[in-house]
Amino acid sequence: MVKHTIQIFGRIKPTKKTTTVYSVDNEEQTGASLEFVVPRDLADGFVNNKRECYKFRFQKVFDQAVKQEEIFENIAKPVADSVLAGYNGTIFAYGQTGSGKTFTVTGGAERYSDRGIIPRTLSYLFERFSQDSSMVYNTHISYLEIYNEMGYDLLDSRHEASRLEDLPKVMIMEDPDQNIHLRNLSLQPSANEEEALNLLFLGDTNRMIAETPMNQASTRSHCVFTVHLCRREPGSATLRRSKLHLVDLAGSDRVSKTGLNGQLLTEAKYINLSLHYLEQVIIALSEKNRSHIPYRNSMLTSVLRDSLGGNCMTTMIATMAVDKRNLDESISTCRFAQRVALIKNEAILNEELDPALQIARLKREIQSLKEELAMLTGEQRDDQLTVEEIQKLEELVKTFLDDRDPDVTLSLGPDMRKIQYCFSLLRMMIMDKHGGGNGRSDGSPAETVREEVIQDSYHSAAEVTKLKTMLKQRDNEISILVKMLKKEKKRAQDAGYRSTDTISADHGGRAMQYMKRGPQLSMGKQEAFETFIRDHEDHLAIEDNKNLLKQRSAEARRLGEQLNEARNRINELKKKLEMQRRQRAAHGVMGNHTEAEEEVDPVEENLCKHIEHEKKAYKSTIGCLKALRTEIEHLQLLLERAKVKLQKDFHKWWSQEEASSVQESESEAATRCRAGSPSGTLQPSSPGTPGFG
């Protein structure tokens, strides 16, 4: 058990506006401090006793110029290491709306360097999995959204990119031990980093986002991204289960300042209420001798029960905007962080026995006890030995006979069928050795039947061995065919990408690349889409990412060629080294060498040095190629996300344009009617008027 207080960190959002007077000191021995200076107002001669200085302590405070990588290294990496060791972990961001919580947790959608805590943590975890070959890891991912006090599963594959109301609603269930269970929340397996990032992209696509006066893309819900990890040594019945919660809380809104109304006002009320209940739980936990903690007041506090005062290693990031108009909210966020720092958690190593392995062990023990009981009572078993049992017994007898140790024993258990079969097998081997395989003791029918049974067993065992060998060959053939299909698929995709680039270059537009997997548009709508893309706010970022992706792909191809060349050089050097050693051996046989030459061969030593140098360069190139692959996958994910956003924005803009054109046509028609009839009513036309017969 590990007892520790919740770790708190502060992050200041970069801004170009006029900021308040603040100072950051990370050099203190007890941690870091953040100080705000608020000058007093001197007006009308009144005495103002308001505080001028507000000072708060954190583990560390990150100023405006900090990079996302430094945030991950200092905040998320220690928590990820504890999760790998078997402890539960939580990282949550708290602050007002527009202070940078989502950017810190999820990251930006424009540049690869803007990746947030979630994608960087996923990359780090799967990198550690590949390095630790002594353990078997199983990973599952869930993504919960809490919107207006209702839970939704963002990873439901049946409702991709649909309305939030159509997603499965998640219900909170509590067992007799007061453990929280989330009903209808799916756990999606992820075998590699790419699958995990695709799940993150799917959840972010379904997430509720709206524009507010404080933030153009404000998240209007709380989101909990959870990585469920199971770790076990091969063959061991003991496993460790741990969870990592990465929480992006919605920002609080001061309605008197933002002037929200309608649906945004309703969302703000639910957000502020849930954050108020969260603060109540924090206050209750920080007070000594408090008997009741109000976890059940809201869904957010129920989900985070373990993270707050329970079995978890928790870290909080307080995000602050230091504009003058946001000074009060920033001070309020710091006060909240100071209360959180008083909470003590008790993290327990989540180690348990694997139920499946335990059941298998108990079944073997029960079978052994039944056989022992049958031997003691003299009860005979009527069922025959299976082919697998016969084959295993033959292998045991063969191993027993081949072993030269005089103290070796043949362990068969208390099953009399196995004992009798092994005696018959040994008797037949002895008779074959002395009589050439044709001798029988008395030629009795019982002996004949026994011989036939043994021969049939031999034939069955040989057949099973032959079938297993054939099955293994078929598996190898299938794996080779699958690899060939993957290579052909990759080659076809590369050809498709090249053809797409050619089409976009010929037409002078970029719409075909974004819509290559989307619905086909009419010519007029296609032209409008191309114009919409050129004028979109994300156009420059998309072009930069496309160019960067091309550069990284070219660099990856170049590194791949370097790897092939290095591999060929290493093979050539190994051949030369082998040739040199053979020549030395030949000279040694002929006696044409001295003792000094036998000890050190400068040519061989030089070749060994060259091989070591090439191996180091080869490993370094592989590391660079792995990093490039991760960056390329993330850039592809950003482009896919931008494509989905462009399609949504275009359809929304197109619907608005259609609605406005319909209104204009209706107003023009009404104007023409009023112009033809001063009284505003239609007059009957004469028989000669066209259209009115």
Image (cartoon, rainbow, N blue to C red):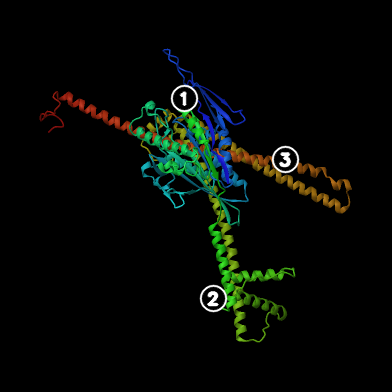
Q: Kindly check if marks 1 and 2 are in contact, taking CB atoms under 8 A apart as contact.
A: no
**Is the residue 457 above or below the residue 559 in the image?**
below
**Which labelled disc corresponds to residue 393?**
none
Q: Disc 2 marks which residue? A: 383
- Label 3 is placed on what type of residue? His
- Asked whether the viewer can see residue 53, the reply is yes
Q: Quadrant of residue 421?
A: bottom right
Hey, which residue is sitting farthest top in the picture? 45
Q: Disc 3 marks which residue? A: 613
Question: How far, Cα to Cα, is label 3 from label 1?
Answer: 58 Å
- Label 2 is placed on what type of residue? Asp
Compare marks 3 and 2 and give the one earlier in the sequence: 2
Q: Residues within 10 Å of mark 2 (few under 14, many from 20)?
A: few
**Which labelled disc corresponds to residue 327?**
1
Q: Residues within 10 Å of mark 1 (few under 14, many from 20)?
A: some
Helix, strand or loop at mark 2: loop
Q: Where residue 474 sits: x, y (%)?
A: 56, 60
Q: Quadrant of residue 481?
A: bottom right
- Label 1 is placed on what type of residue? Leu
Counting labels gives 3
Q: Where residue 603 sits: x, y (%)?
A: 80, 43
Mark 3 or mark 1: which is in front? 1
Question: How far, Cα to Cα, is label 1 from label 2?
Answer: 83 Å
As drawn, is 282 to the left or to the right of 465?
left
Q: Where residue 484 sits: x, y (%)?
A: 55, 51
Compare marks 3 and 1 and give the one earlier in the sequence: 1
Classify the position of the C terminus by image quarter.
Answer: top left
- Asked whether the viewer can see residue 513, the reply is no
